[in-house]
Image (cartoon, grey):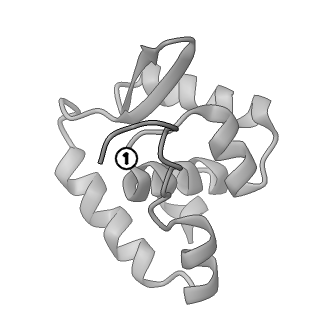
Amino acid sequence: MLKAIFGSEKKGRILLYLYTNGESYPREMARQLDFYLNTVQNQLLNMEKDGILYSKLKGKVRLFGLNPRYPFKKELESILEKVLQFIPVDDKERLYMQRLRPRRTGKPL
């Protein structure tokens, strides 16, 4: 289903991951989606070049997310939301659930 919509199964899964998780970095996406890191990086750079994604540096890590200035952002999000409804519950929980990062040591509540 994703290949028919986005032209690539991997591109569709990366977009779904970014839609459900907000921002992320390539190594985390590769680990979660079980892709090669090089594949994820190439897809992210191509989508950034097309204006679908943005990237920013946070320390030494480059984070990617859906570009809020992308002209078809609302349409893209509505398509991703509909695609998300057809994904089996097990896969949805494993791949596309919001991640909870551990609290930094000594960080006040």
- With respect to residue 89, does 32 lie above or below? above
Q: Which residue is drawn at 82% across and 40% down?
A: 36
Farthest residue toward the bottom?
89
- In percent of width and height, residue 35 lies at 78, 48
Q: In this view, does 58 lie to the left or right of 77?
A: right
Three-letter code for the amino acid on which mark 1 is drawn? Gly
Examine the image and state in which quarter residue 72 appears. Answer: top left
Residue at the right extreme of this rendering: 36
Left or right: 9 in relation to 79: right
Residue closest to the eye, 37 or 8: 37
**Can you give x and y, in whole percent of width and height, for residue 60 in the image?**
57, 11
Vertical side of 44 occupied by 7: above or below = below
* The quarter of the displayed image where residue 77 is located: bottom left
Q: Which residue is drawn at 65% across and 42% down?
A: 28
**Residue 64 at x, y = what percent?**
45, 31
Question: Percent x, y for residue 13?
Answer: 58, 57
Q: Mark 1 points at which residue?
A: 22
Residue at 47% x, 46% y is 103
Figure quadrant of the N terminus: bottom right
Seen at 41% across and 39% down, the residue is 23
88 to the left or right of 49: right
Q: Locate residue 7 relative to residue 82 in the image: left or right.
A: right
**How would you rate the neighbour count of disc 1 (Cα within 10 Å): few for under 14, some for 14-19, many for 20 or more?**
some
